[in-house]
Amino acid sequence: MSQQGITPRASDYSQWYLDVIAAGELVDKSPVRGCMVIKPHGYGIWESVQNDLDARFKATGHVNAYFPMFIPQSFLSKEAEHVEGFAKECALVTHHRLRSSDSGGVEPDPAAKLEEPLVVRPTSETIIWHMYGKWINSHRDLPLLINQWANVVRWEMRTRPFLRTAEFLWQEGHTAHATEDEAVEEATRMLGVYSDFAHETLAIPVVPGIKSATERFAGAEETYTIEAMMQNGWALQAGTSHFLGQNFAKAFDVTFQNSDGNLEHVWATSWGVSTRLVGAVIMAHSDDTGLVLPPKVAPVQVVLVPIWRKDEDKERVLAFAKAAKDRLDGTVRVHLDDREKMKPGAKYFEWERKGVPLRLEVGPRDVDGNAVFCARRTGGKKFGIPVDDDFVSVIEAELRGIQDGLLAKATQQRDAWTFRVETYAAMKDQMAKQAGFYLVPWHDDAVTEREIKDDCKATIRCFPLDCQDEAAGRTCFYSGRPATHMAIFARAY
Amino acid sequence: MSQQGITPRASDYSQWYLDVIAAGELVDKSPVRGCMVIKPHGYGIWESVQNDLDARFKATGHVNAYFPMFIPQSFLSKEAEHVEGFAKECALVTHHRLRSSDSGGVEPDPAAKLEEPLVVRPTSETIIWHMYGKWINSHRDLPLLINQWANVVRWEMRTRPFLRTAEFLWQEGHTAHATEDEAVEEATRMLGVYSDFAHETLAIPVVPGIKSATERFAGAEETYTIEAMMQNGWALQAGTSHFLGQNFAKAFDVTFQNSDGNLEHVWATSWGVSTRLVGAVIMAHSDDTGLVLPPKVAPVQVVLVPIWRKDEDKERVLAFAKAAKDRLDGTVRVHLDDREKMKPGAKYFEWERKGVPLRLEVGPRDVDGNAVFCARRTGGKKFGIPVDDDFVSVIEAELRGIQDGLLAKATQQRDAWTFRVETYAAMKDQMAKQAGFYLVPWHDDAVTEREIKDDCKATIRCFPLDCQDEAAGRTCFYSGRPATHMAIFARAY
C-alpha cells in the first residue's frame, strides 16, 4: 500500500485488492513461503462464515469430526485420477526429530527418518475413505454425513492472500450413501446450501452450475460449483460440491450389505469452501476507500465513536455511548471506540477501512437530544437515530438495508456484465471492452476449450444449472457444431 | 473392548478408559502412528468445550487469529530453553512434491527439497513472536491479546486417546504487555478462566497452582496449572498458563517505546488447553456402564425413545415424541431416536454408553397421560414428567441437577483422597493403599524431587495457590529442611 492510501480499482485492480487487505488489517505476510497470517479482523470474518455455515450443515443432518492431517504417502496413489491432481505439490514429512547441528543450529536427525513419508493433507478423501471402510458394513450405517473444519496444504507457486495460499483453512464434507441417486441429491443439496449462504450471508449472487471435465475435481464423476463475479468482471470459484461416484469406495474397497444381503460399493460426495470466501467478500463489495463488509459477516457491525472537546463533556458523552452500546449488545456486534488521544476523524478513517457497516457518532449535542448520529459505510446522508425503545430495531433495520443493498448492487453488476453472445468473435470483441460472464451455446470438447484458453485466457466457469435447456437446437459459438451445453466463459482467479 | 462389554474400573482402570471410549464411539485408531480419528460423538464434546471457552476468552478481551502451522527450523533454536523442550520430537517437512516411483507408487521428489526444513508447530510462540516483532512498536499497541484454535504435533512415543497423541487440537493464547505486573496478572487471570471453566462446565474440581521448575514450560519464568484428580486417584494436568517474562521478546527482539520514549522489551504470556480435556471428562465421571457426561458438554443432552408394539400406536407415539422434542429444541440439545427395527432396550444401552444425561421414554400409556418417563444416566428411580408448560424448565432443572451432582461427587472424591502427610514414609505408606493428592510441606529442590520420582513415581503436580502460607515454619516432609512451599505430590498421567 502506498503512503498516499489505497490504489483506486480503476488504475490497478490487483494492487487495490492488496491495499484494501493491508488497510483493513486482515492479513500479514509470514516468514513461511506462501503462508499467510490471518490477523484478528480477517479471522473474525472467517469466524462469521464458519458459524453461519456450520449451522446450515447441522440443519441438513451433518455432524463434525476430525481426521489426522497426515496421510500415508501410499494412500495418495490409490485413486488413479486423485493422485494426478493432488500428489504433486504437497508438503512431505520425512523426519520426526531435530538434532543439534555443528553450526550451532538444528537439523533433521537422520536416525529419525520415517519409514514411509507422510503427506500433509491437500484434501482428506483418502484417509477418510480408509476409515469409512472400517465403519460401513450394512445399509444401516448409511448415509454417513460428516464434515470437518481443518487446515490443508497445497504447495502453490504463485500465492495471493485468501485466494491462493499454501496453507488455508476450510471445511470438507464427506458423505457416503447407499445409492447413486442419494449421492447426487446430496451433492446438489450442498451446492444449494453454498448458493443460499453466498446470497443470504455474503451478499454475493453466485451462479450455480456444473464444471466441464477439464475443471472437474480429481477423482469426481461430476463437480458442481458456485461462481462469483468480482468487480472487475472476473470470475471466482467460491465453492464446489462433488459427486464422487464409487471411485473412492472402489479404491479403498468400501462395501455395504444392501437390504437384499448383497455387497455393493458405497456412493460418495465431498464438498468444500475455504478462506478463499473471505477474498471473495473483499473483492465483491469493497471500494476505493477500503473494505466494505456485509453486516452478516462483519466482525464489528456497529462502532460507537464518542466525541468531546471539553473535559466536562467527556464523562456524560462516554456514559451515554456506553448505555447505547449496552442496548445493542447481544443483538448486534458492537464496539465502543473509547481510545483517548486519538481524534474522531482518525477513528472514522480506521473503521471505514475496516469495513464496519454503521458508525454512530456521539457528541454533547447528541446526548442532549438523546440520539446518535449515524453514517453508513456504503454512503448516503448521515442521519440521527433516537436512543429510545426502537433504537435496537432501527439499527437492525439499517443493517438489513445495507445487507440487501450490497446484494442488489452485486446482482445488478453481475447481470449487466453477463453477455449472451453467439460467436467467438463477438465474445473477444466484447471482452476487450469489459470482462464478464459470457453465456454461450457450447459443444463440449476439451480440445477447443483449451484453444480458447490459450487464445484469450477465458475458461469455462460452469454450465449454469438454470439454462441448460436453452442449448437444444443451437450451434456452438466456437466450433459451429451442435451445442451440448450452455456455458459461461470468463477470466478467472 | 471385550465382547462382554466394558472392563470394570476396579479390575483394570487403563483398559476401562479404552473400553469406555470404544463403547461411546468417541475415537478410532488411524493409519498414522499416534494420530487418532475423533469420531462425531467425541468431536461434539470438543465443540462444547470450544464454544464455552471461546466465549470466556472473548469476554476477557481476547480475539482470535491464525498463524501458519509451519515454522522455519531456525526459529526453534532462537529461545535457548524452548529448543530443549520442543525441538526434539517434532514433524519435519523437507520436500514439497511427490513424483512417480519405479515401483508404481510415489516418492518425495529430490528436486523439490526445501532449502530450510519446516517444523510442524508443536506450539506457536516462535512464529507468533516473530510476527509480534512487526506489529508492536509503541505502548499504544499493547496489550495484544490473541488466541488461536489450531492443531499441533508432538511426536510422542507412547500415545493414549485424548491424553497424549502425536497430533492434537488445542487453543493457544499469546499475549504481549507493557509491564511485568500486567503479564503476571494476565497469566493468573487465564488460569482463573480455566479453573472456572473446569468447575462450571466440566464439573471437575481442579486445583490451581504453580509448577515446580522441573515441570515448567520450556521458555517460561513461571507456569501455572490446573490439576484434576481422576477416579483412580491419579492427577491429570488439565491446562497451563505461562508467564514468559521477556524471554521471547528478547529472542525475537520485540521492543516498544514506552510513554517516556524509551525502548523496552515486551512482557509475555501464553496459555493453552487441548483435546486432553475430553480425556479428563471421560475419566472423571464415567462408570462401569460407560460414558457419563456433564450436561454442559454432552453433544446430546436429552434423548427421546418412542416405544410401541402395535402398529396403531406407532403414529401417535411418534407424533407425541416429536411434539416433546419441538418443545425442547432451541433450549436443550435433544435427539429423537426414531430408528425402526431396533428394540428400545438396545437404544437405552447405546445411549447409556454414549453418556446422554437424560433419557425420556414415550410409550402409549405416557401419551395417554401426557407425560414422558425419565431416566437419569447418573442413576436413581425413573419418574414421570408431564409435557405441559413447565416441561422445558423441569428438564433444564434436571440437567442442572445432574451437572451439580457430578461436581459434588468429584469434589467429594478429591477431598477424600487429598492426604496431608508430614513425612515421606507416611506418604509411601498411604500411597500403597490409595493414590491421591499428597499435600506436604516441601523444601524446593530439583534433586530431591527427582529422587522421589525415581523411588515412588510421584511428582509435584503443583504448589496450590490457596495454601502457600501454611509452609511457614514447617519442615520439608522429605529432607527435613525448612519448607519453602506447600506441594501436592501425586502419580500423574
Image (tube, coloured by chain):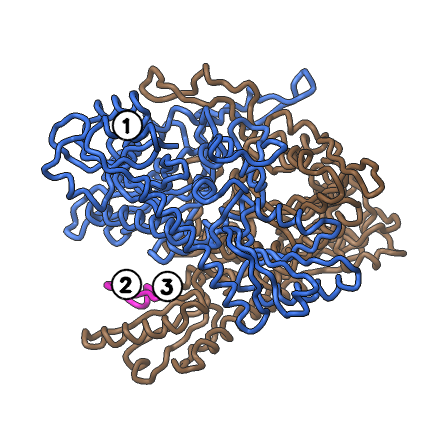
Chain colours: A brown, B blue
Q: Where does label 2 land, which residue? A: A339
Left-right relation of A158 to B348: left
Question: How far is the residue under mark 1 from the one under mark 3?
Answer: 70 Å
Quarter of the figure with residue A103: top left
| Type of the residue with mark 2 | Arg
Callout 3 crowding tier (Cα within 10 Å): few <14, some 14–19, many ≥20: few
Give the residue at x 66% y 63%: B321
- The residue pinned by badge 1 equals B429
The secondary element bearing badge 1 is classed as: helix
Residue B306: name its quadrant. bottom right
Q: Are marks 1 and 3 in contact (CB under 8 Å)?
A: no
For marks 1 and 3, give the one nearer the viewer. 1
Secondary element at tag 3 = helix
In magenta, the rendered stretch is A336-350
Q: Amino acid at mark 1?
A: Asp
Residue A483 on image: x %, y %: 85, 51
Q: Is residue A348 magenta?
A: yes
A471 up-or-down from B457: above or below? below
Residue labelled with disc 3: A349
Q: What's the amino acid at mark 3?
A: Phe
Count how many numbered circles sit on residues in the image.
3
